[in-house]
Image: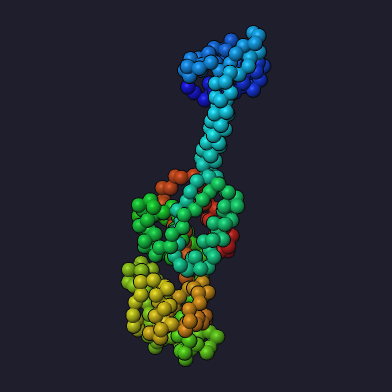
Amino acid sequence: MELRHLKYFVAVAEELHFARAATRLNIAAPTLSHQIGALETMLGAKLLTRKTKSAVTLTHSGRHFLIEAQETLKQAAHAELVGRRAGRGDAGSISVGYVLSAGCSGLVSSNLDSFKKAHPDVSFKLARKPTFGQFNALIDGSLDIAFTRTPQCYPSGLTGFTVDRQAFCVALPEGHRLAARKHVTPAMLADESFIAMSLEMEAGFWGNISAVIPPGKSPRILDRAPDPFTVMMLVAAGVGISVLSESLAGISIPGLVFRKIVGITRTCDIAVVHRRNETAPVVMALIDFLRARARTQLR
């Protein structure tokens, strides 16, 4: 049994007339009669009773079969629509990874919200991961799009583009001598003891701390932490100070304050990273959307 058999039967059942149904379907009446006969043979049930040469009534079996046939055709039409929309990039599911600074800045949520308004049938799965973890997930296929720190170079098979530039702030214990200032300069930080990210988190990137230390000075790294939140906890505990992106200053932790660093040109850049050979229409639609927004916002 094929969908055409259901379409033929529904047309006859709704018109209760072979000639009118044949006209509606744009086929010959004898062809339609033959197809309905074939359907009844396949089902082993009589669906229609003829009143005249063309006029018919539904049998008990026909009335029950009509309900199912109509629902099946509706579902098939919906499946076709979803397939066409997915092929255009208007529907589907996208797995998105992000680093903490991209999440706290509103970069991820605002972009996905804007995209979804134009593509309401697209859904997202979000996962917070460190930059290198996102690279691995893109390569193994468990992520489709990643909001990461902009690397010096992209791993093989991946590419990307910068979508945001954030200023650097110094994170201080609230009792620190610099906490009373509105902003600080790199020279004020030269002799401080820093909490840094773990080496595997910083590898391949210009570290936050090196971005604000005066030329010729080497920062004193007192301790390292596996993630930005742990860095902030250690700073709040008075272990040392650190340098983080401006977006993280919105996180409130008792004992922790942020002050903007002035006199530097380096920024904390966020990139959208994706597979170089991406073919999924819905993922490509999001990539194009994000690239277009980045061109406008980073002018």
Question: Residue 29, percent across and down?
Answer: 61, 12
Question: Residue 177, percent across and down?
Answer: 47, 91
Q: Is residue 269 visible?
A: no
Q: Nearer the viewer, residue 264 or 290?
A: 290
The colour scheme is rainbow
Question: Residue 11, percent across and down?
Answer: 61, 22
Q: Residue at x 39, y 80 (%)?
A: 234
Question: Residue 36, percent across and down?
Answer: 55, 16
Quadrant of image for the C terminus? bottom right
Q: Nearer the viewer, residue 223 or 157?
A: 223
Q: Residue at x 62, y 11 (%)?
A: 50
Q: Residue at x 46, y 89 (%)?
A: 176
Q: Nearer the viewer, residue 181 or 233?
A: 233
191 vs 112: above or below: below
Q: How many marks?
A: 0
Where, by quadrant of the figure, is residue 77 drawn? top right
Q: Which residue is most to the top?
A: 53
Q: Is residue 184 left or right of residue 16?
A: left
Q: Residue at x 54, y 29 (%)?
A: 68
5 vs 127: above or below: above
283 vs 3: above or below: below
Q: Which residue is most to the bottom?
A: 177
Q: Is residue 199 visible?
A: yes
